[in-house]
Image: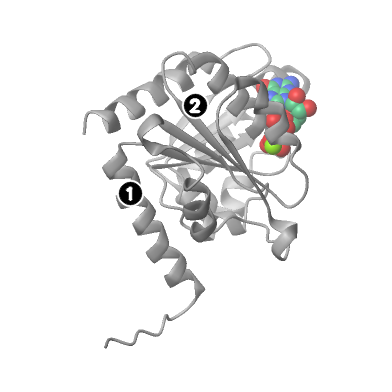
Amino acid sequence: MEIKILENIFESNREMAEEIRSLLNEKKVYMIDIMSSPGAGKTTLTDTIIGKLKYEYRFGVIEGDIKTATDAEKLAKHDIPIVQIETSLFGGDCHLESSWIMKSLDHFDLDDIDCIIIENVGNLVCPAEFELGDDERMVVLSVTEGEDKPIKYPLMFNSSRTMVLSKTDLLPYLPYNIDTAIANARRANPDITIIKTSALSGEGIGDLLDHLRKNIDRKKSA
Ligand SMILES: Nc1nc2c(ncn2[C@@H]2O[C@H](COP(=O)(O)OP(=O)(O)O)[C@@H](O)[C@H]2O)c(=O)[nH]1
Ligand SMILES: [Mg+2]
């Protein structure tokens, strides 16, 4: 009998994330982990993405919040499977862990889903530390948060494949230097893909949808 002592919580989390990754590879389901500060626009973007793509792809959503199911309720109109994880019920953690994602996957028919969107708990710190077995980490940074956040929270930006720079409709009203924000994101992660969006005006949403189409299709044909 092999007795294995896990070094720490991150290791057990990482192992479960690998199991999730294998399962989703087998089922050809693309999974995105959307992370941001509270209020940067994760739910609004999820709503927009699903609203625009739900006739092309079959979606499932996992909503992570410390308290309430209000984001899940906002998305209920799309009539897609949604699992709400309310972390206050088991300690109020500020992030999601892979074991909870694995349990959530039981509620989906993975043969009937093309893309799962996880909306992580809102903050730029702990969600970055927990791998969830996704294909893409997407950090949303709104233009009201300042240009410096990528260098203040480098792990979040360094571990994300994509940064959505959201709420660009507000740029005319802010002393905000978008070039500095982009340079800071590239300092944290030279390879990060940056997509500028406004859910209000629709600017850049086409680019975001094309990015998702390309990745979901690639996974389907892998
Ligand atoms: N001006 C503007 N407001 C937005 C945009 N996207 C989201 N919001 C607003 O920002 C607030 C927080 O958005 P929400 O999607 O709930 O953020 P979350 O906490 O990251 O899920 C809401 O009042 C949204 O209406 C945008 O592109 N432009
Ligand atoms: Mg939200």
Residue type, numbered disc 1:
Leu
Residue at the location (48% across, 39% down)?
Answer: 108
Q: Position of residue 2 (x, y in %)?
A: 28, 86
Label 2, on which residue? 195
Within 10 Å of disc 2 (Cα), the crowding (few <14, some 14-19, many 20+) is some
Element under disc 2: strand
Q: Position of residue 154 (x, y in %)?
A: 54, 54
Residue at the location (64% across, 19% down)?
Answer: 199
Q: Is residue 132 visible?
A: yes
Q: Quadrant of residue 222?
A: top left
Element under disc 1: helix
| Structural distance between the alpha carbons of marks 2 and 1 | 29 Å
Please determine whether, in this image, residue 22 is positioned above or below residue 135: below
Please determine whether, in this image, residue 121 is positioned above or below residue 19: above
Within 10 Å of disc 1 (Cα), the crowding (few <14, some 14-19, many 20+) is some
Label 1, on which residue? 23
State which quarter of the image contains the N terminus: bottom left
Q: Position of residue 186 (x, y in %)?
A: 46, 41
Q: How many marks?
A: 2
Please determine whether, in this image, residue 191 is positioned above or below residue 4: above
Q: Is residue 114 visible?
A: no
Residue at the location (47% across, 46% down)?
Answer: 105
Residue type, numbered disc 2:
Ile
Q: Quadrant of ligand 1?
A: top right
Left or right: 22 with respect to 20?
Answer: left
> Is residue 3 or residue 109 the one in the foreground?
109
> Is residue 151 or residue 135 the one in the foreground?
135
> Is residue 120 or residue 59 the one in the foreground?
59
